[in-house]
Image (tube, grey):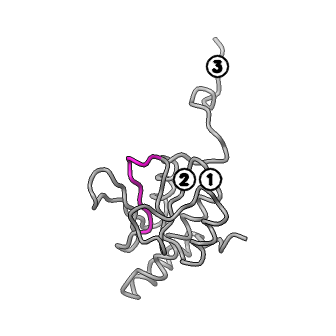
Amino acid sequence: MREYPLIFACRKKNIFNMDIIEVRDYLISLPMCEECQPFGEEFAVYKIGGRMFACTAFERSGIIALKCDTDRAILLRDRYDAITPAWHFNKKHWNDLNVDLLEYDVIKREIRHSYLTVIKKNVTPKSLRDAILSIVSEAGLEDAGCPE
């Protein structure tokens, strides 16, 4: 009997992209990330320190909304066709990423940026923000900076 590696038993996967399940797995792997459904069962919301940094709508498969620095948001939309102003969010601060069309590294970079931006700018009180930043620092998580 011939044995096939597990990779061939599973569906073919483009190694350059993440599917929405892998995105979810990455999101919940971030220190102190909370997954909840405050908008109903059709949405998954990801929070840090009680503040939302990412959201997916199950009816919009392959799309994730991420909070973003305003200048960076515009730069990303100009650079990538798969990044657009977020649906049902403040378009100045939120982008939709089509994970089916973006490279793995871009997706992870923008998730980290959203996560760290929310910690630094939205988490209060300062004592909670500092505690979270300490845990994040110990985990070695860094913002990759703005893409060129």
| Residue farthest along the top direction in this orientation | 1
Expressed as whole percent of the image width and height from the top left, the position of residue 86 reads: 46, 63
The amino acid on which the numbered mark 3 sits, given as a three-letter code, is Glu
Mark 3 packing: few (<14 Cα in 10 Å), some, or many (20+)?
few
Secondary element at image label 3: loop
Q: Residue 60: say if magenta.
A: yes
Task: State if disc 1 and disc 3 touch (CB < 8 Å).
Answer: no
Q: Nearer the viewer, residue 5 or 23?
A: 23
Q: Nearer the viewer, residue 25 or 38?
A: 38
> In the rendered image, which residue does mark 1 sit on?
102
Splitting the image into 4 quarters, where does residue 47 fall?
bottom left
| Residue farthest along the right direction in this orientation | 148
Q: Residue 5: say if magenta.
A: no
**Vertical comparison of 18 with 35: above or below:** above
> In the rendered image, which residue does mark 2 sit on?
98
Q: Nearer the viewer, residue 30 or 22?
A: 22
Quarter holding the N terminus is: top right
> In the rendered image, which residue does mark 3 sit on?
3
Task: State if disc 1 and disc 2 touch (CB < 8 Å).
Answer: yes
> Which stretch did the figure color magenta?
53-61
Task: State if disc 3 and disc 2 touch (CB < 8 Å).
Answer: no
Q: CA distance from mark 2 to mark 1?
A: 7 Å
The amino acid on which the numbered mark 2 sits, given as a three-letter code, is Asn
Image point 46% across, 61% down: which residue?
A: 65
Secondary element at image label 1: loop
In front: mark 3 or mark 1? Answer: 1
Mark 2 packing: few (<14 Cα in 10 Å), some, or many (20+)?
many
Q: CA distance from mark 2 to mark 3?
A: 36 Å
